[in-house]
Image (cartoon, rainbow, N blue to C red):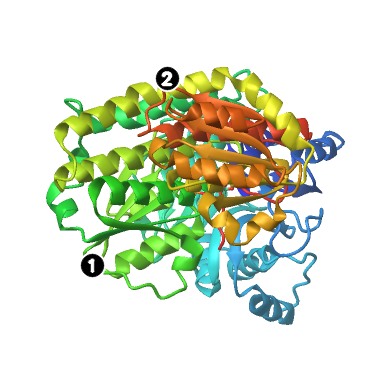
């Protein structure tokens, strides 16, 4: 989704801003723009549809861009097509503004402003906010004017604003869209997320809802909604710039898959004491977990699939009723939430609008909320009653990979801890899980990564087709859903994920000679049933590719399939997590074979901060 960066300090602002915009590219965007003070003090903007390179080309032919203060934006179109005019910043000769979020009453505001004589140039909702702030600040009092304007605005926003008569000064405001202030030495920045400021500083303040801030190169002043000065505690990002760069890999997605073994260890080790799981230091008391009657996991996209796995582990291992739901459905269906429910929100970014809304709903109903989040200080992390961070490091590729792996690993460990507390898991079983998760899982993921060539040959077959299937049972049905999502996201091949036993109730009619079917089989206990389902598709001419773990019954799998990818030593407890890596690499290879944009697939955004 849209990205914001702003800079004030001694460096060339256009260079800093363009660097920041590149760092934000991973969020997904379709146009970009920048506003800055010219040498003589006038306020200027340059905007372009398309990639940041188009903006850079335009800027290269501009004169007088030598500037020490400016704001920049990457836009992901919601109101109005991705054109030069609709790109941010918006405003006039007195003010320039960039915006993330949606102004819900922009039509109303526009009509009011037009009556006052304002002329609109774009189709965006943002222009209404920019001109409204101009109207409210014309008497000169910036703070009072911005506060007055935001009281009239309905919707979500993170704003970065420059006023022509105060060069070097950036104003910022936020409501339901993240915005941070990067704290440097003799320079300060604003940004929609930490990756944009890492080249300059790791220290930042997270603005809260209703905050307005004034930023100069050596001061940062934050005001609350009532106009009184407020203190926001500085935080330090755990990530460094190197971590946010590609590190020699052709794509971020590839690098992020390779980081999975380490990410798993980093995420799990802090939660293990004397060989068994322990989450008590993180604000989760065994008494509370014992009292929980059911667990509901709410999330979006890939995180939702991690939630499905988490719910299955909680039921199977800890014997507690658990389910997973899509946040955008949950928030509007008047769900019955009971006070003795545990509601878990899983989110890589911690800023997904629907997940945040679900969290607030659960809190309002009196349930205990637990965020499983990758981004320190994000909204889900701040607002949940307790938070468990996943330590995957920055995930830049739009398609989520390592975040999923650590989310499922952490949910499994959490399920085992819950089982220990509720006496459904013995200490010995817990120890075996811990060793499978922290030793076998990273080792098996490494082995899968080393077999990338085999995956490439399967990918070559799939890349030529327009449709395919992923099938599996139990944990593998969830894995099939995630595998299918990954493939669709980055290769644009249509695929269906099906619980293998359900196939014959309809969708098997789509299997034709040559249709690729990936069958997942990580559990020996259900393997015979899977074999039956595989035979059904082979009988209809499918090209069967089997992904399996374990030794038992795998000979038959190999005989039936065109190519079989078997991990003989992978323990069943972690096999669906390890095989997810194979599915991610397979999707990656298919995307490459089809010449797609792996890291920034069309129409998708990394962090969906609007509903
Ligand atoms: C977007 C991304 C997905 C991600 C989902 C949830 O749709 O493209 O990769 O899984 O948002 O994001 P979150 O940050 O809440 O995990």
Q: Is mark 1 within 8 Å of ligand 1?
A: no
Query: Which residue does the image show at 56% across and 52% down from the upper left?
Result: 498
| Quarter of the image where one finds residue 13 | top right
Q: Is residue 356 above or below residue 19?
A: below
Q: Is residue 156 above or below residue 454?
A: below
Q: Secondary structure at mark 2?
A: helix
Query: Which residue does the image show at 64% across and 46% down from the upper left?
Result: 537
Q: Mark 2 or 1 closer to N-term?
A: 1
Query: Which residue does the image show at 43% across and 44% down from the upper left?
Result: 475
Labels 2, 1: front one: 2
Q: Count neighbours of disc 1 (C-alpha within 10 A) and say few if under 14, some if 14 to 19, many if 20 or more.
A: some
Q: Is residue 93 above or below residue 195?
A: below
Q: Mark number for residue 339?
A: 1
Q: Is residue 258 left or right of residue 13?
A: left
Query: Which residue does the image show at 58% across and 34% down from the upper left?
Result: 546
Q: Is residue 570 above or below residue 601?
A: above
| Quarter of the image where one finds residue 433 | top left
Q: Is mark 2 within 8 Å of ligand 1?
A: no
The residue wearing badge 2 is 443
User: Can residue 468 be seen?
Assistant: yes
């Amino acid at each position: 989704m849209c990205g914001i960066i702003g800079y004030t300090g001694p460096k060339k602002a256009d260079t800093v801003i363009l660097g920041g915009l590149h760092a934000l590219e991973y969020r997904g965007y379709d146009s970009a723009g920048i506003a800055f003070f010219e040498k003589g003090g006038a306020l200027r903007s340059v905007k372009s549809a398309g990639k940041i390179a188009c903006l850079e080309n335009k800027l290269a032919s501009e004169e007088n861009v030598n500037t020490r203060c400016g704001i920049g934006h990457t836009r992901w179109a919601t109101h109005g097509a991705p054109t030069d005019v609709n790109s941010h910043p918006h405003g006039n000769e007195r003010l320039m503004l960039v915006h993330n979020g949606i102004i819900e009453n922009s039509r109303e505001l526009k009509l009011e402003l037009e009556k006052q004589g304002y002329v609109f140039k774009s189709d965006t909702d943002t222009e209404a906010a920019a001109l409204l702030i101009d109207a409210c600040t014309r008497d000169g009092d910036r703070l009072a004017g911005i506060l007055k304007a935001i009281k009239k605005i309905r919707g979500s926003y993170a704003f970065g604003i420059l006023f022509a008569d105060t060069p070097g000064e950036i104003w910022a405001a936020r409501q339901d869209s993240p915005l941070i202030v990067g704290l440097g030495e003799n320079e300060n920045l604003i940004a929609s997320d930490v990756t944009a400021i890492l080249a300059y500083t790791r220290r930042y303040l997270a603005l809260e809802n209703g905050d307005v801030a004034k930023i100069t190169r050596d001061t940062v002043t934050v005001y609350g909604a009532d106009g009184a000065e407020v203190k926001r505690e500085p935080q330090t990002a755990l990530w460094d710039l190197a971590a946010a760069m590609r590190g020699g890999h052709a794509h971020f997605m590839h690098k992020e898959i390779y980081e999975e073994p380490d990410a798993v260890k980093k995420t799990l080790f802090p939660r293990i004491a004397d060989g068994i799981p322990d989450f008590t230091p993180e604000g989760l008391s065994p008494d509370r977990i014992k009292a929980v009657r059911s667990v509901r996991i709410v999330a979006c996209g890939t995180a939702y699939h991690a939630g499905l796995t988490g719910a299955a582990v909680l039921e199977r291992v800890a014997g507690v009723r658990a389910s997973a739901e899509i946040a955008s459905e949950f928030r509007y269906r008047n769900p019955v939430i009971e006070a003795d429910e545990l509601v878990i929100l899983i989110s890589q970014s911690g800023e997904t609008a629907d997940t945040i809304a679900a969290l607030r709903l659960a809190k309002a109903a009196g349930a205990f909320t637990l965020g499983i989040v990758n981004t320190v200080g994000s909204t889900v992390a701040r607002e949940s009653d307790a938070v468990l961070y996943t330590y995957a490091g920055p995930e830049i590729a739009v398609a989520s990979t390592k975040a999923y792996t650590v989310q499922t690993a952490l949910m499994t460990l959490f399920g085992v801890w819950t089982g220990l507390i509720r006496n459904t898991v013995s200490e010995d079983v817990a120890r075996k899980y811990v060793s499978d998760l922290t030793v076998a899982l990273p080792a098996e993921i490494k082995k899968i990564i080393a077999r990338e060539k085999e995956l490439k040959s399967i990918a070559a077959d799939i890349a030529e087709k327009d449709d395919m299937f992923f099938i599996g049972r139990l944990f593998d049905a969830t894995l099939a859903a995630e595998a299918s999502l990954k493939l669709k996201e980055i290769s644009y091949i249509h695929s269906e994920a099906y619980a293998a036993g359900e196939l014959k109730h309809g969708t098997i009619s789509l299997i034709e000679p040559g249709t690729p079917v990936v069958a997942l089989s990580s559990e020996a206990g259900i393997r015979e049933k899977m074999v039956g389902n595989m035979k059904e598709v082979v009988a209809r001419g499918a090209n069967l590719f089997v992904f399996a773990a374990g030794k038992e019954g795998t000979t038959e799998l190999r005989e039936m399939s065109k190519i079989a990818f078997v991990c003989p030593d992978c323990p069943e407890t972690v096999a669906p997590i390890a095989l997810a890596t194979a599915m991610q690499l397979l999707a990656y290879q298919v995307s490459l074979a089809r010449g797609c944009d792996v890291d920034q697939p069309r129409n998708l955004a990394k962090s969906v901060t609007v509903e």
